[in-house]
Image (cartoon, helix red, strand yellow):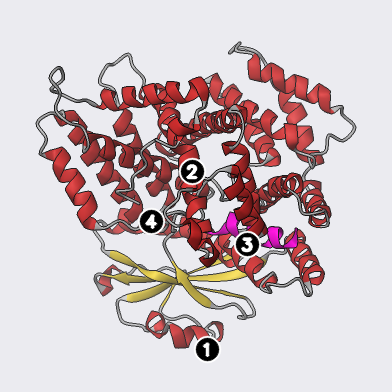
Amino acid sequence: MRDFFKNRLLELLHKDTLDSYRVKVNNANSLLHELYHLLFDWKVGKIKRFETVQYTCMELLDQLKNDECISYGEYEKDCIIEELKKLESKDEKNASWDYTQYLIFRLIDINKDAYLERLFLKVTLGIKENACQANFIQLDRLLNCLIAELIRIGYSKNFLYIITKSAFARKDDIGFDCSFEKYKIRLLEKKKEIFHVFFKLIFDKTETIPDNTELIKSIPTELITAKAQQTNSAFFEQTERTRFLHFEENVLDANTSLAESKLKLSTFLDKIHLSLGIVQVEVNKSTYITNTNNSKGRCIYTDFVVDGTSIDTVPYEKIDHALSSIYSSNIISADVKDRINCSLRHFRLGNDARDMEQKFINYWIGLEYIFSVPEKDSSTFTRIKENLPIVLLCGYMKRNFIYINNLVMRDKDREGYSGVNIWDFDETMLNELIEKSPSSLIKFRLSKIKSLLIGNSEKRKDYLKRHENHLVWHIVRLYRLRNELIHDAAIKNNIVQVTSNLRYYLAYMLNQIIHYFCNITESEVKSDYTINDFFYEYKLLYHNIKKYYNKDIIFNVAIETYIS
C-alpha cells in the first residue's frame, strides 16, 4: 500500500497526468462551501438559473455517499441528506432556502479544521491495510479528497508535488513511517511565511517610469541567494529602463505567493496604462521569489502553465494537411470552416495569455463558437450542455485505456504484447499483466480495466453514466465561472484546475471535428456538410453505445490528435 500511496500521490499532482487521473476540483467539503455561496448568490439575484444551484447539490450528494470524513456533529446525517435532497429536486424559484443554507453553514463550521485531520487519519489507516483492489479504491478516493482539500486551503499544486516527491524519494520503504509523519505534520501545520516577490519590468522610455514606492531599481543584495545569482544573473541586471516591482505575501508557499502577487501586478499595470496612455511595459518571463530569511530564493516562471499542455506533441504537417483538406473542400460549409478557424484562433490566444482569467475566457469563446446558434430563441449554453457531454463521453473510456496502454507498454517486460491494444486482451493476458507488473498503481489500473472488459456490460454502464453526470455538473460550473468573469468582471485566482479542464474540452472537440470533416467523402444525396452533421453523428454513436454498452462499439470510436 505504501508503493501505491507514493505513486498515486505523484500521479494526482503531476502536470502531465491525463486529466482523468489528476486531482479532481472538488471534495465534499469544498462543495459545501460552493453550495453555501451559490444559495446566497441565488437569493440576491446574481444567479439566474436555479439549476446552477441544483447541479452543485447533486454533486455534493454524490460525494457524501462515499465520504467518511465529513462530520455532522450532533446532527443526524440522514436528516441533513433529506434536506439537501429537497433542494436537489425542488424547482420553486421563490422558495426560501434560509434553513438549508444555515444547515450547510453549520456543517462548514463543524468541519473547519477537523476535515483535513480526519482525511490524514483515514489515509494513515489506509496505508496499513492489506494490498487488494478494494483497499486501493478506498485509498485512491481518500488521496483525491486530501489533495483537493490541501489546494482548497491555499497550498499550490506545484508545491505539493515538490514536497511529496522529496518526502518519498526512496524507492524502498526504509524510513517511510518517519517521512510520512513529517509530511503530515508539515501540511497540517498550515504555517504561513512572508514571501518577497519581485517582478522585473522593462519600460519603453525612462520618462514613462512612474514614481512609485513599490518600484525599485535593484533587489536588495541580502535577499538574493548565491544560487539564484549564479543561475539567473541576467534577471538581476539593471538598466535605466528596468525596475523591479516588489510585493510581500503572507501565504503557505512560494507558488501561491506568485499567484497572489500577479493579481496585484495586473492592477498596477492597469493603473499605468490609465495614467500614462500608450505605454509599453514588458514583464520579464521570470520572477524572483524568496522568503524573509532568504533560504528559499529562486527564479520561477512568471506565467501560469495549464496542466496537460505537454502530454502530446503533434507534427505540424499533420494539422496542416488536415486543415488544408477541410478548407479546400467543396462539400463542407463555409460555416464549419469559419467555426474551426475561429476556435483554433481562441485556442492559441488562450495558450498565449499570461493571466489565467484570459486563458479561461479565450478557451470558453473558442468552445462557445463551435456550439453557437444563429436563432435568437436558441441558447448556445443549452446546446453546449446537451452536446458536449455526448462527444466527450463517447471517447472517454477509450482515451483512458490508451493512456494506460501507453504506460503499461513502456515496460520492457511487455515486449511480448507489442502491437496489441490492451482492450483486445483476454482475461488470461490481463491476469498475466497484473501478476507481472512491479507497480501497485499499474496493478490497480489493470484490475480496473479487467473489471470493465470482462463479463457483462453493467460495470461499463455505471462507469460511463457516472462520468456523464460529472461532465454535466462541471460544464454548469464552467458556465457560471464564465458569467462571473465576463458579466461581473470578477478576478479569480483559484481557477487553474477548471481552466485546465476547459482547455481539454476545447482541444478534444477541435480534434474530433477536424478528424470528422477531413475524412468525409462526397455523397449522391448530400453536398453540403454542416456542424450539425457532426453532432448528429455523435448522437447516433452515443445512443448506440448506451443501448448495449458493447465494448467493440466503445473501442471503435475514432480518437485522433491534431492539436495538443
Q: Mainly helix, strand or loop, the magenta region?
A: helix
The disc, 4 or 3, on the residue closer to the chain's N-terminal end is: 3
The residue singled out by tag 2 in the image is 424
Read off the magenta span: 1-14
Gap between marks 1 and 4, in whole Å? 37 Å
Gap between marks 1 and 2, in whole Å? 56 Å
Badge 3 crowding class, 10 Å Cα cut-off, few under 14, some 14 to 19, many 20 or more, is many
Quadrant of the image occupied by residue 137:
top right
Nearest the viewer among 101 and 447 is 447
The disc, 3 or 2, on the residue closer to the chain's N-terminal end is: 3
Number of the front mark, 1 or 2: 2
In the displayed structure, would residue 139 be above or below residue 301? above
Gap between marks 4 and 3, in whole Å? 24 Å
The residue furthest right is 74
Element type at mark 1:
helix
In the displayed structure, would residue 48 be above or below residue 30? above
Q: Which amino acid does label 3 sit on?
A: Leu
Q: Where is residue 128 in the image (x, y as percent from the top left)?
A: 83, 57
Element type at mark 3:
helix
The disc, 1 or 2, on the residue closer to the chain's N-terminal end is: 1
The residue singled out by tag 3 in the image is 160
The disc, 3 or 1, on the residue closer to the chain's N-terminal end is: 3
Element type at mark 2:
helix
The residue singled out by tag 1 in the image is 226
